[in-house]
Amino acid sequence: MSVSTGAALLWILLLTFIVSTVSGAQKLTLTAEPGATINIRNNNQVKGCQVCTGSGNTQHCSIESLNSFSGSTVSVELECSRPQDVFSIEIVRRINCTTKSCSGHIIQTDSNSVDVLRFNRTFTWNLAAAAPKAFQIDFTNTGLKQINPSEKCPDRHTYTLQAFQSTGNVAVGKYCRSGTISSAQILKSGSFSVDVPAEQKLQNDKFDVTVREKIKSLARISLTLPKGTSSSELLSPDYPESFPDDDTMEWYFQVPDKHGVDLQFLNLTQPDCVKKEVAVEYHQKGRVTSVLGLNDTQPLQNQGDFLLTLRNCEMERAQADSPGLTFTLKVSASSPASTVPCRVDLSKTEGLSLNISTVTSTPDCVMKINSAKKDNITVTSSADLSFEDCFPGNMEVRATQVIDCSSGKCPDPVSLSVPLLPSCLPAPLSRVTWILRPGQHGTVKLISPTGPLKQSLPGQLCDDSITIDVAEENGATIGSFCPNGAIQTVHIHTSVSVTWWSSMNAKAPRSAVLNASFEKEITERYIFTVSPKRDTPELVATPAWPAGMKAYSTVSWIVSVPPKMEAQLIFTKLSQPKCINRHTNIRVQRMGSPKEDYSRREDEVANSELTVSESFYLNMSNCLPERGNFSVITKISLQKSNGLLLINILSVVAALLVIFVMVLVVVCVVIRKKKKKKKLNHEVSVYNPNGINFLPGYNGPPKTHEDDDAHVYTSIDDTLVYTHLLKKGADVGFYGETYQHFTGHTDSQKPLLSSQKGPPLPNRSPSQDQTLMDQSEDEQSSNLGPRLEPEGGN
Ligand SMILES: *[C@@H]1O[C@H](CO)[C@@H](O)[C@H](O)[C@H]1NC(C)=O
Ligand SMILES: *[C@@H]1O[C@H](CO)[C@@H](O)[C@H](O)[C@H]1NC(C)=O
Ligand SMILES: *[C@@H]1O[C@H](CO)[C@@H](O)[C@H](O)[C@H]1NC(C)=O
Ligand SMILES: *[C@@H]1O[C@H](CO)[C@@H](O)[C@H](O)[C@H]1NC(C)=O
Ligand SMILES: *[C@@H]1O[C@H](CO)[C@@H](O)[C@H](O)[C@H]1NC(C)=O
Ligand SMILES: *[C@@H]1O[C@H](CO)[C@@H](O)[C@H](O)[C@H]1NC(C)=O
Ligand SMILES: *[C@@H]1O[C@H](CO)[C@@H](O)[C@H](O)[C@H]1NC(C)=O
Ligand SMILES: *[C@@H]1O[C@H](CO)[C@@H](O)[C@H](O)[C@H]1NC(C)=O
Ligand SMILES: *[C@@H]1O[C@H](CO)[C@@H](O)[C@H](O)[C@H]1NC(C)=O
């Protein structure tokens, strides 16, 4: 103590400034004590002002800076009227440490000269430890708080810590006085500085500097968290620039008894890594307790003091525009409420149970149900619970509701809503599971009251704010879904578990998560109805993807395609097993069409993309695999169909006229028969005044007009007209095979499916595809050329 007080006194005496004003130029006499350096800097490079030293021939002037070296007294002339607007003064001192002790401490003292106070001043201490040791600066008395470099401190004293590394200087951080940071260790050498603006006197202060053992990082910042609830923020070194390449930084947290600490990486940007990964390690009592990515949820720390080590990767240098690794580390500490009693009554909701558990086990947290201590609590009816010293952030509350409809006495539909629970529970519900039992041979139908669902798949991932996992009751997953997609309904021919969860603590919705109905047996195991949107391709995957479908199971997607549109299907990530019994099959069949338009077994090579001009079934079935699995993601996109330019067809192939006439006759006959039938909702037929044609579609009957009232749409029976037509066509030999297996070399072609088949047409243009008399996928269709790059045969 006496040594450092002595040193401070010495510096006050030696560091004297004398300023006098001589005809516009100010004269400043500065004396630096031994070991100290004084710099006069024109930081803002203001022109028309210079700093000069010496006189006559030895005079040296500069507009940028002047360094005055240790122990010398220098007379300085600042040649302009308000030099304090141009120049700032920096006083640099040095503290050397041996392996045992350091040559001084950081003692903040200012000049007593009013003239010097007119200048911005920076007081810098360069510190060096005897390699390979580290030095430590102790801030216990004041504490420091890290700030964003763009922020200012309330008392206008801004502290800066730097680490001098072989690869360059690293800005460890900028700080204000008073905060949770209690010390800083820096490996080998670095600097500590305080900036004070003009007219602000540097507060007298002292920070002890000591020698520490080597650290395995550029710096280690220690925080002493106060008792009770507190929150601090730390920033990545060099912020807002990237964390240094391939480097390591440590933070040590001293945590009061029975307190929990939550860490969150906010405003995180992550680099592109060439080697290694960005990772954060938690160490406790010298042991690594967990290693995580920065994107992962960080576990609550409630076992006392801990060390956090952050390692950057070897970053991709080429990407100059990438922000690299930057983050704000939010540190929230809390002490748990001592004892919270909580009465729960679930008896009003049939089949509901609650599970309450700790995320990481905590000796302090005592949970009791009806006075009995438990590691985790399950409530099935009503119970008196109590929670002692349990951190809300470390608690998980899950609900399960069994809805058994085997008796057939369930409301239709059953609303699956997140149950309301008492607020005395230690945490909000994080997960709700409904087990839906349709009874033997029954089917569960799920429909989202808030609009169609999207399946979470690579390329259209859910953002995790709300996820609905659908599985069979035995646990076999079907898929994960979230709002804003194209899946209208899901039918599952077995007992189902639906789990709603949110990884982002999203509030439970007030409305139902899903509506469930219990229906009669269906032929497939799973059926999805899909209404793709015009501008968003929709991905759907076989149940359990990326795992394979169950042996022998079947899935069907009923895809509706609006009028004047066509759907393009691309099978991606197709995995086929080797079957020992039966075959896998992928089939496409237009609504109302008696034949398949596409079929592909595991032992066949076929096109992986096709276009379908109207609503269709996409059915898949699995075999009994010997090895491997059956799984595929199907991408469904809508595109404008190529119009109905009948006239072109007629001019190209006159022979087709025969068929048109035939169709016309048949349609007219049927319309007369059916004229009284009511108009249906889903109108997909297209009236074309250039001719008489129609495009039969899903849900909708084909329509045409009667000879004279050209603008009256009349509803007619779909299947009747359709099958009649097809039969006639077959009779006269025009409707052949509706699909063909393509071999590898034809992969650049795509089958184009339309409502009816006709004879091959030479040199058709794509605009002629969607016609009444369309072709089958014969060799001629290769003239159309691919519309998409093919995915490949398999
Ligand atoms: C002095 O510091 C203030 C803010 O602290 C800054 O705006 C000003 O430009 C500085 N002046 C000089 C000459 O560096
Ligand atoms: C610190 O060490 C350097 C050389 O390593 C020396 O030049 C300087 O004078 C020393 N300073 C103090 C204050 O001991
Ligand atoms: C994140 O960045 C935004 C914009 O840069 C800023 O407004 C916000 O305060 C930052 N949040 C934190 C926690 O640093
Ligand atoms: C972290 O999460 C963000 C947003 O969820 C994502 O954009 C980013 O790619 C993720 N980074 C890593 C390395 O996982
Ligand atoms: C809750 O606990 C019960 C009984 O231990 C168990 O059957 C049920 O699966 C658990 N539910 C959850 C969501 O963990
Ligand atoms: C619940 O507690 C029991 C013992 O009380 C334990 O066997 C079981 O693993 C715990 N379950 C969970 C999910 O923590
Ligand atoms: C969901 O069920 C509620 C009643 O339980 C009903 O009012 C609503 O129309 C249903 N929504 C859908 C999309 O079926
Ligand atoms: C496809 O599945 C549907 C049920 O969704 C069924 O009606 C249709 O006959 C199936 N078609 C083929 C070709 O398997
Ligand atoms: C097939 O899927 C099952 C789960 O459905 C999985 O256990 C198995 O490893 C998968 N096999 C292959 C070859 O992918």
Image: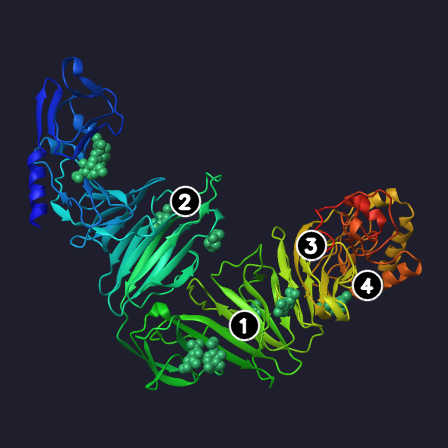
Identity, as a three-letter code, of the amino acid under mark 2: Asp
Q: Which residue is mark 1?
A: 498
Horizontal and vertical percent for residue 698?
72, 61
Identify the mark nearer the N-term, 2 or 1.
2
Marks 4/3: CA distance? 21 Å
Q: Which residue is mark 3?
A: 570
Looking at the rendered image, the disc whose residue lies closer to the viewer, 2 or 1, is: 2
Residue at 83% over, 58% down: 738
Q: Is mark 1 within 8 Å of ligand 5?
A: no
Horizontal and vertical percent for residue 498?
54, 72
Marks 3/1: CA distance? 29 Å
Identify the mark nearer the N-term, 4 or 3.
3
Identify the mark nearer the N-term, 3 or 1.
1
Q: Secondary structure at mark 2?
A: loop
Res. 783 image quadrant: top right
Identity, as a three-letter code, of the amino acid under mark 3: Ile
Where does ligand 2 appear, by image quarter? top left
Can the viewer see residue 522 in this picture?
A: yes
Horizontal and vertical percent for residue 320?
46, 38
Q: Which of the pair 500/45 is nearer the observer?
A: 45
Q: Which residue is mark 2?
A: 245
Q: Which residue is mark 4?
A: 595
Q: Decide if residue 556 is on the left or right side of residue 707.
A: left
Marks 2/1: CA distance? 45 Å
- Packing grade of label 3 (10 A; few <14, some 14-19, many >=20) is many
Residue at 21% over, 19% down: 61
Q: Secondary structure at mark 1?
A: strand
Can the viewer see residue 612 in this picture?
A: no
Marks 3/2: CA distance? 42 Å
